[in-house]
Amino acid sequence: MSRVYRIEQVRKPLENYKDIDAFKIYVSDSGLLCAKKNLAADEILYMTEELNDFKGGMTENYVNIQLSINGYRTYYWESERRAEIDFVIQREENIIPIEVKSADNTKAKSLKVYMDTYKPAYAIKLSAGNFGFEDGKKTVPLYAAFCI
């Protein structure tokens, strides 16, 4: 089986899960997003209390920008029991789930559900923590999202 054929086979399952009624909206400019939410630069730089309610969404938006710049089409996954994966991408013949956390000491329960169900080659967890690899999960610091 050729590599091109395998990649096309992976692309087909991704397309089959496309649900036009289930989507998240991201903006391509984080500055505009901050302006829309009336967030000042120092609130972002120093992660003030006012940002807590919006930190997760803003972090996801940042990661989406980085993935898009790197040429990935991003997908979103949600189970019937409300587990959700922030991004699912295709890298060559692999479908890779990506969980985004805005802190460093967080559990990724939904990522475990996805991994147990679909058995991906590996998964990626972006957080404020350091680089690592454990139990099939690559941990990548948020600042290095551009490396994916």
Image: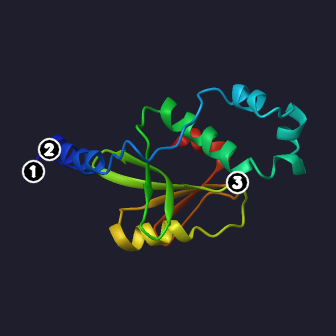
Label 2: which secondary element: helix
| Alpha-carbon span between mark 3 and mark 1 | 40 Å
Q: Quadrant of residue 91?
A: top left
| Alpha-carbon span between mark 2 and mark 1 | 7 Å
Kindly identify the residue that appears in the image at 63 percent across and 70 percent down: 107
Q: Are marks 2 and 1 in contact (CB under 8 Å)?
A: yes
Residue 123, compared with residue 11, is above or below; it is: below
Q: Which residue is mark 3?
A: 102
Q: Measured from the top left, where is residue 114 in percent x and y?
A: 42, 67
Q: Which residue is mark 2?
A: 5
Q: How is the image coloured?
A: rainbow
Categorize mark 3 by other alpha carbons within 10 Å: few (<14), some (14-19), many (20+): some
Q: Measured from the top left, where is residue 81 in percent x and y?
A: 46, 71
> Which amino acid is tagged 2?
Tyr
Label 1: which secondary element: loop
> Which amino acid is tagged 1?
Met
Q: Is residue 10 left or right of residue 133?
A: left
Q: Which residue is mark 1?
A: 1
| Alpha-carbon span between mark 3 and mark 2 | 37 Å
**Which callout, 2 or 1, points to the residue nearer the camera?**
2
**Which callout, 3 or 2, points to the residue nearer the camera?**
3
Q: Is residue 8 left or right of residue 96?
A: left
Q: Is residue 51 left or right of residue 23?
A: right
Q: Tell me which label, 3 or 1, sits earlier in the chain.
A: 1
Front-lying residue, 73 or 128: 73
> Which amino acid is tagged 3?
Ser
Kindly identify the residue that appears in the image at 68 percent across and 58 percent down: 130
Categorize mark 1 by other alpha carbons within 10 Å: few (<14), some (14-19), many (20+): few
Label 3: which secondary element: loop
